[in-house]
Image: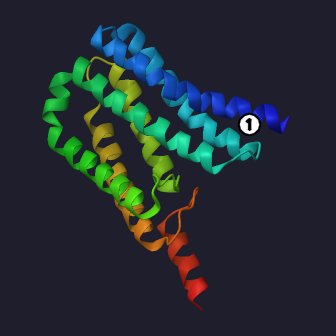
Amino acid sequence: MQRTSYYLINAITLYRLISAPLLVLLLIFPRQDIFKWLIAFSFFTDSIDGWLARKYKVESPTGAKLDSIADDLTILVALAGLYVFKTEFIQEQLAIILVLLALLVLQTSYALFKYRKTSSFHTYMAKMAAILQGSFMILAFFMTEPLSLLFYIAAFVTGIELIEEIIITYYLPVWETNVKGLYWVIKKNKRADS
């Protein structure tokens, strides 16, 4: 059963990796009717693959790394979708989006510099940010106008989450996956020092 679970969970993550180029094609040949369903399914699979991995105890560093890459691709394609299908909203919120993208680039660059790989921490804050981002994106494509309040909440939590991951990268001497959050990293470091 564990071997089957391992392949199933990795297939779910692989779907998100493979669907990203297909979603880009749906942006090039504007098909919002198909795009919105596939991006919604990508966000849904994002929400279940980590849970399934923990439930069936098939977590792995490689799976966590692939999941992080798939998460980032899903968000980037969804942002591109907003640009194509909800251009006015993107133009209005461009400053916030650029700040978040800058934080993402800083966090990713710092992790690559320090660990030679992306962070893949999967903190509680990252999970909360992913739920908020996914909820906003799905609703944005299914409604006539994106919900600004939900966007601001998702953006705020995402910004805090990215700052937390930058600080965690500073504190963690070696790469780890599935870190609960900054509080637990500091607590672990204090125990190690005493």
- Give 117 or 8, whichever is nearer the viewer: 117
Q: Is residue 108 above or below residue 31?
A: below
Read off the residue under disc 1.
6
Residue at point 39%, 15% (across, down) = 35
Relative side of 74 to 91, left or right: right
Looking at the figure, which quarter contains the N terminus?
A: top right
Q: How is the image coloured?
A: rainbow
Q: Secondary structure at mark 1?
A: helix
Relative side of 103 to 164, left or right: left
**How many discs appear?**
1
Residue at point 62%, 51% (across, down) = 61
Q: Does the image show residue 33?
A: yes
Residue at point 35%, 13% (across, down) = 25
Badge 1: few (under 14), some or many (20 or more) residues near its Cα, within 10 Å?
Answer: some
Relative side of 173 to 164, left or right: right
- Give 137 or 116, whichever is nearer the viewer: 116
Residue furthest to the right: 1
Picture coordinates of residue 178, whole percent (x, y): 58, 56
Q: Does the image show residue 146?
A: no
Picture coordinates of residue 85, whole percent (x, y): 25, 17
Looking at the figure, which quarter contains the C terminus?
A: bottom right
Q: Is residue 121 above or below residue 58?
A: below
Residue at point 15%, 24% (across, down) = 88
Q: Quadrant of residue 78?
A: top left
- Give 32 or 58, whichever is nearer the viewer: 58
Residue type at numbered disc 1: Tyr
Picture coordinates of residue 169, whole percent (x, y): 43, 65
Q: Is residue 191 above or below residue 131?
A: below
